[in-house]
Amino acid sequence: MADHELVAWLEGLSPWPSDGFGLERMRVLLESLDSPESRLPAVHVVGTNGKSTTTRMVEALLLAHGLRIGAYLSPHVLRWAERIRVDGAEADLDSALRAVRPAAELLDATQFEVLTAAAFVAFRSAGVEAAVVEAGLGGRHDATNVLDATRVVVLTNVSLEHTEVLGTTREAIAAEKLAVVQPGSAVVLGEAEWEPAAREAGAGTVVVAEGGAEELAVRAAQLFLGVEVEVERDALAGVALPGRLERRATETRDGAHNLAGVRWLSGHLGRERFTVLASILADKAVDGMLEELSGLGERFVATRSSSPRALPAAELASRARSFFPLVEVRDDPVDALALAHALGEPVLVTGSLYLLADLEARGA
């Protein structure tokens, strides 16, 4: 049972640094905790989409090889403890947060800094032999970019995102993400175009593994273990993440939260026609996402997740009317879900992992 006071403290922390992005506070926080990240062999996963799935797949492959593995990913859908894993299961998040909290409060650490430090504390406490670590935002200034023994970096793909922080071109964003590369480390790329950038960042070996998360994970695990080692692909059969192409009887849920994610989703849904229920964050390519979603059905229900960055439902509906013949609005996500089913099944719930989390939290 989670410590509700600890969860309330965590949820009350700022998700964004008030003094700009950087690693100085994160390094001080970790030093105060006796540097739990130091000398931890790691696979560092960066990119725009598919990071969590790739992280979980690398975790599964390394576990199948007999190693004791820690994994750190974000965001969560059901509960905060999803983000920190040891030996294939959720770690003791409460204990890790208690260890981190005193120093975090003194430093005014952000929510992501606290969680990242908690992950490293949990890994040290469990005596893991290696970690698979998913970056949050970008790479260069991300709180995860404190690892000093990274063996493999995975760059899943690059799309325009967080341009106010990462840059306004794919090239600039790729450079920010590849800044986590350490001299001589191996890099696995989901897109071949970034090979020159990876080498410029200091990669010793660059491998292109186009074809999705499974190929990326297999090559990353092979490079981590030694290329002559065969990995057990069968270990990937049980890897499933909530809110990632999650199929239910009359409903599909996927947290595609940007244009590239929606395009990927569209390519994996076949020819079914859906009633689309969505909430979208205001800083995303909203019109592009709506246009892509309109290819999946004619009916659209606009709602608003609990994220402060979510577009108001009425504004989302107004913009959706340029793309869908039928648009309805419900501010409350649970009411919106009921309406979507009434309009016609199957239903596709998408646009934001926050929306999926809100529905799960209320048992919908």
Image (cartoon, rainbow, N blue to C red):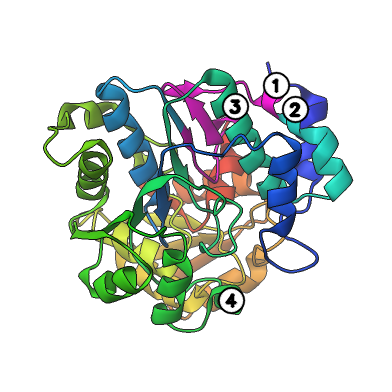
Q: Earlier in the sequence, mark 4 or mark 1?
A: 1
Mark 3–mark 2 contact, CB under 8 Å? no
**Which residue position is annotated with label 2?**
99
In the image, 220 versus 356, the foreground residue is 220
> Looking at the image, which residue is at 34% across and 74% down?
200
In x, y percent, where is residue 291? 39, 75
Q: Secondary structure at mark 2?
A: helix
**Quadrant assignment for the C terminus:** top right
Q: Is residue 9 left or right of residue 61?
A: right
Residue at the spot of label 1: 95
Q: CA distance from mark 4 to mark 1?
A: 46 Å
Name the residue type under label 4: Ser
User: Residue 289 in the image: x percent, y percent?
Assistant: 43, 71
Q: Amino acid at mark 1?
A: Ser
Question: Is residue 139 visible to us here?
Answer: yes
Name the residue tied to disc 4.
Answer: 318
Q: Are marks 3 and 1 in contact (CB under 8 Å)?
A: yes
Quick one: label 3, few (<14), some, or many (20+) residues within 10 Å? Answer: many
Image quadrant containing the N terminus: top right
